[in-house]
Amino acid sequence: MSSFTTTTEDSVAVVTFDLPGEPVNKLTAAVRLEFEALLIHLRDDSAIKAVVLISGKPDSFIAGADIEEFTALTTQAEAERLSFEGQEMVSRVETLAKPVVAAIHGACLGGGLELALACHYRIATDHPKTQLGLPEVQLGIIPGAGGCQRLPRLIGVRAALDMILAGKSERALKALRLGLVDEVVPHSILRSVAVAAAGRLAQTGLPRRKSKGGLQDTLLDRTAAGRRMVYRGARQQVLKKTGNHYPAPLAALEAVRVGLEHGIAAGLAEEHRAFGELAVGDVSRKLVQIFFATTSLKKDDGIVPGSAVPRQIRRLGIIGSGFMGSGIAGTAVLNVEVDTRLKDADLSRVGKGLKAAIEILSERLKRRRLTRPQYERLTALLSGGDSYAGFGRADLVIEAVFEELDLKRRVLAEVEAAARPDTIFASNTSTIPIRDIAASAERPERVLGMHFFSPVEKMPLLEVIPTELTSPEAIVTAVRFGRRMGKTVIVVDDHPGFWVNRILSPYLNEAAFLLEEGVPIELIDTTMAAWGFPVGPVALLDEVGLDVAQKAGRVMHEAFGERMKPAGALSRMLAANRFGRKNGVGFYRYEDGHKAGVDSSVYPLLGVRPVEGADARLVERRLVYAMLNEAAGACAEGVIRCARDGDVGAIYGIGFPPFRGGPLRMLDDLGAARAVEALHLLQDQHGERFRPAAALVEMSRQGGRYYPA
Ligand code: T1G
Ligand code: NAD
């Protein structure tokens, strides 16, 4: 079956790419062969004066190289060859003696954008699905089909590095401003505008692009000395962000540098060399596994497929317009465009909550992600009050009041009285079992947990927690709604702390034990940041709020006993009125809302003196194993449905270092036997809380794993 069909309109060949049987267009080896044959035909057919390349898929132009195909490669030489062949194919487009216009609608990513860059003119649709980018570094590789060469030449080295090193995509209007595309049009006229442009270029020759920008661009982008500054700055930024754990961004920077300083041939050679090395490396393997795990979660509704259909959510009610309630409201309005009503105990709190929700929208307006009319329309969807007025029409109600069981039960009863019998009730509790909240519910089949993470608009994870009584319809509705809010959703079992807080708890508690022993705060936090977490555990406690952390710790202690007994550090801090960032004093000092260094007056409060010469490796060992061991235990209890959910949850919920693949993947890499051995040592030194989970011991005996080898 062929992937390309060609029709001719007034001597313009319109080539439609539609990979049979696949949801998106990908560049596979078979596609490359067919396309190269087609290029020869286009070159030799004298009736054809110009070419348009367009996609037959509803919302992808080309999603890049086939990730499955290149991850099947086992040797560096094979991977290098794949990149080299991609470069060759793309170069043949650029050197075709006839103008080629890329007509782009939908995802234009990786190799797809590299192909478009080799075309002579690019037109994109203004549709939000149209995204242009080089996401390769997110897969641990670099653009390997000339992207490191053509992008900086087209849009300038600084703008190109911004895109390549972060792997971020741009919408059409931004792409137009950057000079990445030549025109932006509505989808309905994409094809006709592209055909007209191709015809025009055939007559008038290739477009000449004026170099954009002022003096600064000239100095920084177009002089060798200026570029040296750019490379140095970019390198520092990459190291700061990735802490040297991710080799791809630096390799991409080098491929760009070599190309600009030594010519495109040298640049292409460096590009395919580095691609080959990275594609078979461990970091890329891990990141690709996470890509496929995330993709498969997009289709997993947490129910037996087909056993229920999701309800449409037209109106959303939120109880509690505090920190979380307002964040959920703003994010729901932004991404789902749903009518949202907030309720709190009094009007001044409602006002505050509405303001915070609108702030999420204003932020997008400022960054030009929303137009003024869109912003006006979205803010009009938000309303609030101090009563249940309007809740009779809500399809879904999310509760985000204080973390108190009695209060949550009362709110549920009030909602059941005020709302329709078929309204779904979701609690955003972070630790309390949902079955306890639902214990006296009239309609427990409509009650579940939707556990968002803070800040809601930024954190990519949602845990959906059904009880034994929750209906499949309620589950699938919550999962789909969360997904529309932009979240990766895992469905987890109803145990205290669910998954993410369950594994986070012993980790944070271990940090508190370290503090009580006088291990310096800086040492704890820099150790774990260097290990790959976005922030260290002590800074994280400050972010979460020490009161919130203490409450959660108590719930966990009650549920799991001695093993989760809280260290005393938090109570001492709270007794001194230190809540963390929220009141400006925690383990760190805060000035104008910015973290301003460790507050050394904390040590006397904790009754210790900072010890000198503490061993960072031991600190790391205790913290990491506290989490890994809990992950193994919780997994064996069935908190998560599979290892995939656990690893994705840890990475998206608490920033577990992606290059390590997640806690369960890490246990597989270590081997259960080694993990058990390390835990036994810790148990001897620090007590029973490090007793290895029974499941892990069993695994070490049987040589089991979480993932197939
Ligand atoms: N390779 C293989 N499979 C892919 C794919 C790709 N590039 N892109 C998508 N899929 C599959 C996906 O796994 C799923 O499969 C189905 O398509 C629908 O995807 C030389 C080497 C395009 C924005 O990183 O970001 O080019 O589960 O459910 O939400 O330099 O998929 O149905 O069997 O995600 O509408 C760089 C990755 C490659 C883009 C669509 N490209 N894809 O999102 O649908 S490296 C990427 C995405 C490269 C060159 C290098 C998204 C999407 P299945 P979906 P969606
Ligand atoms: P918050 O104190 O900022 O907000 C709670 C709000 O609930 C307050 O505005 C309060 O006035 C309101 N409220 C209390 N009783 C009410 C009632 N009877 N009717 C209506 N409103 C009432 O707290 P938060 O941080 O937003 O946490 C809310 C929930 O979300 C808690 O269950 C918490 O465990 C959970 N959660 C918090 C976080 C976090 O990081 N803060 C993360 C995930 C989940």
Image (spheres, grey):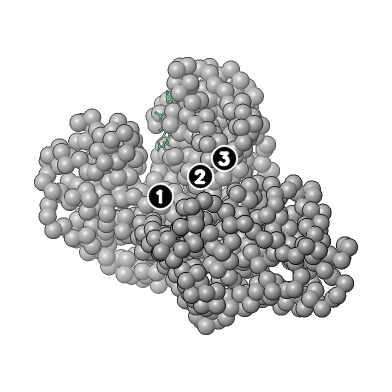
The reply to whether residue 287 is visible in this rendering is no
User: Of all residues shown, which one is farthest toward the front?
Assistant: 215
Q: Identify the amino acid type marked 2.
A: Leu
Amino acid carrying label 3: it is Arg
Q: Which secondary structure lies at badge 3? A: loop
Would the CB of label 1 be found within 8 Å of ligand 2?
Answer: no
Quadrant of the rendered image containing residue 622: bottom left
Mark 1 belongs to which amino acid? Ile
- Quadrant into which the N terminus falls: bottom right
Q: Tell me the number on the disc at residue 368.
A: 3
Q: Earlier in the sequence, mark 1 or mark 3?
A: 3
Q: Is residue 5 left or right of residue 223?
A: right
When the figure is inspected, residue 14 is found, relative to residue 316, above or below; the finding is below
Pointer 1 and pointer 3: residues touching (CB < 8 Å)? no
Residue 52: % across, % down: 77, 63
Q: Distance between the Cα atoms at labels 1 and 2?
A: 12 Å
The residue that mark 1 highlights is 654
Q: Earlier in the sequence, mark 3 or mark 2?
A: 3
- Residue 97: x %, y % from top left: 75, 73
Disc 3 versus disc 2: nearer the observer: 3
How busy is the neighbourhood of tag 3: few (under 14 within 10 Å), some, or many (20 plus)?
Answer: few
Rendered residue at 64%/59% (across/down): 209
Distance between the alpha carbons at the discs numbered 1 and 3: 29 Å
Residue 303 vs residue 97, the one in the foreground: 97
| Residue 462, disc | 2
Whether the residue under disc 3 has CB within 8 Å of ligand 1: no
